[in-house]
């Protein structure tokens, strides 16, 4: 399915951001797609949500 492929591509694009969020940096990340929006990031220790207010693309993942 295309959805799977998109997930993997999204994970690849967000990889650097995810790593930085895990390191405690959750602010001032630019969207890897449009490179204009400042990402809104929510991370509660296990579930991560990353959303761009400009283009509307988002990533959601469980990080156990
Ligand atoms: Zn964007």
Image: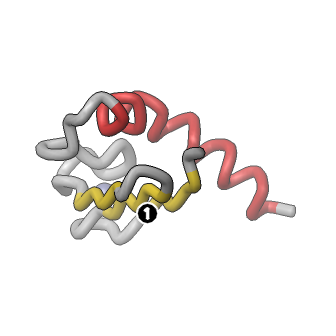
Which residue is situated farthest in the right direction here?
Answer: 1
* Percent of width and height locating residue 43: 35, 55
**Residue at x 12%, y 43% (from the top left corner):** 28
> Which color scheme is applied?
secondary structure
Which element type, helix, strand or loop, lies under badge 1?
strand
**5 in relation to 42, above or below:** above
* Percent of width and height locating residue 46: 49, 53
**1 in relation to 10, above or below:** below
* Percent of width and height locating residue 63: 55, 46
**31 in relation to 51, above or below:** above
Q: How many marks?
A: 1
Which image quarter is the C terminus in?
A: top right
- From the Cβ of disc 1, is ligand 1 less than 8 Å away? no
Nearest the viewer among 1 and 19 is 19
Say whether residue 28 is left or right of residue 63: left
* Percent of width and height locating residue 50: 37, 58
Say whether residue 21 is left or right of residue 37: right
Which image quarter is the N terminus in?
A: bottom right
**Residue at x 36%, y 58% (from the top left corner):** 44
* Residue position for label 1: 58
Say whether residue 25 is left or right of residue 55: left
**28 in relation to 24, above or below:** below
Nearest the viewer among 34 and 28 is 28
Q: Residues within 10 Å of mark 1 (few under 14, many from 20)?
A: some
Q: Quadrant of ligand 1?
A: bottom left
Nearest the viewer among 52 and 46 is 46
**Residue at x 24%, y 35% (from the top left corner):** 24
**Residue at x 58%, y 54% (from the top left corner):** 62
């Amino acid at each position: 399915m295309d959805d799977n492929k998109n997930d993997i591509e999204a994970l690849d694009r967000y990889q650097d951001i995810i790593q930085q969020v895990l390191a405690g940096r959750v602010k001032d990340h630019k969207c890897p797609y449009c490179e204009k929006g400042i990402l809104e990031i929510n991370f509660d220790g296990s579930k991560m949500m990353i959303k761009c207010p400009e283009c509307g693309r988002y990533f959601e993942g469980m990080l156990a």
